[in-house]
Every structure is written in C-alpha cells, then in structure tokens.
Image (cartoon, rainbow, N blue to C red):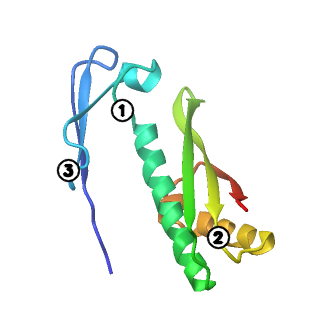
Amino acid sequence: MKITRNGSAAWQGGIKDGKGTISTESGALHAHPYAFGSRFEGQAGTNPEELIGAPHAGCFTMALSLILGEAKLVATQLNTHAAVTLASADGGFAITGVHLTLKARIPGADQATFDHLVQAAKLNCPVSKLLKAEISLDAELLG
C-alpha cells in the first residue's frame, strides 16, 4: 500500500517582510497565513514547527492505539502534546528535537507494559521515522 498526501505553500516578498500561506489537500488548512513574525516573533499565524508537532502527536497517538490493541488493551484517553524545537545550528536553523508528552488512561495496563508500549509507538510512528531530530517522550499512565 502506498498513500500520497499533499500540502502546499505560497510566498510573496522577502524573508522578513514577506507573507505566505499554507494549504492542505484535505482543506483542513486553506491559504492559512504564515510569516517570519509568526515563526520567530510570536505573531499571529502558523509556522512549520507547530505544523510538524500536530501530525507527530497525532501519528504517535494512533500508533500507540494500534500497539495497545495488539496487546489486548484499549485506551479510554490518550492526550499527546508535541513540542518542536527550532534552534540556531551550523550557521542557520534546524529542528533539533521533538518532545512528546502523553497523558493516558488505559484500563488493565501496568506501568512496565505501558512503558514498553509507548516506547514502541515512539519508534514505530511513521512521523518519528521521518524526523532526524532527537525525539524524547514523557508518558504518564493515569489511575
């Protein structure tokens, strides 16, 4: 099986005074604005890092759901946050890390099983495999 999904970006102007839009094939984003200010200065609009974080969190969470099912476990709650770090590196910028934070309710899961399964999800999530940055994880099994 092979699936291709599409995203696109358009840009006008220079790096600091220019403006761009990002769109997705599904329409979830359609000409959504981004610019230097939204990436580096906290201004309104999106940025590539948060757009990497959301699908990484989603992919990891889906991978964990699959792995839990294979272990005959079903989560009642999986909430994942992905913090993507952009830093100066080698005279430019690089995404240097992604930190995943998971809060999970999984009836019947003990801590050792939980720890093993979340690590497997982190390693086997297709987005994790794509990223060359260090990917760390904090996972909490809620009572």
Q: Position of residue 68 (x, y in %)?
A: 60, 77
Front of the two marks 2 and 3: 2
Residue 71 percent coordinates (x, y): 63, 84
Apparent side of residue 5 relative to residue 96 in the rendered image (left or right): left
* 121 versus 139 height, above or below: below
Snapshot quadrant of residue 107: bottom right
Q: Earlier in the sequence, mark 2 or mark 1?
A: 1
What kind of element bears circle 3?
Answer: loop
Q: Residue furthest top?
A: 17
Query: Which class describes the residues within 10 Å of circle 2: few (<14), some (14-19), or many (20+)?
Result: some
Residue 8: % across, % down: 23, 45
For the residues bearing labels 2 and 1, Cβ distance under 8 angstroms:
no
Q: Nearer the viewer, mark 2 or mark 1?
A: 2
Q: Residue furthest right?
A: 112
Q: Residue at x 67, y 53 (%)?
A: 137
Placement of 76 over or under 128, stated as above or below: below
On-image quarter of the C terminus: bottom right
Q: Where is residue 57? Give x, y as percent.
A: 51, 54
CB atoms at circles 3 and 1 under 8 Å apart? no
- What secondary structure is found at the residue carrying circle 1? loop
Name the mark on residue 106.
Answer: 2
Label of residue 112 in the image: none
Query: Mark 2 to mark 1: distance in Å?
Result: 33 Å
Within-10-Å neighbours for mark 1: few <14, some 14–19, many 20+:
many
According to the picture, the residue beneath numbered tag 1 turns out to be: 46
Q: With 121 as the anchor, is 119 left or right in this view? A: right
All told, the count of numbered labels is 3
Q: Is residue 138 above or below residue 59?
A: above
Amino acid type shown at disc 3 = Gly
Residue at numbered disc 3: 27
- Write the residue at 68% across / 66% down: 119
Q: Quick one: label 2 or label 3, which is nearer the N terminus? A: 3
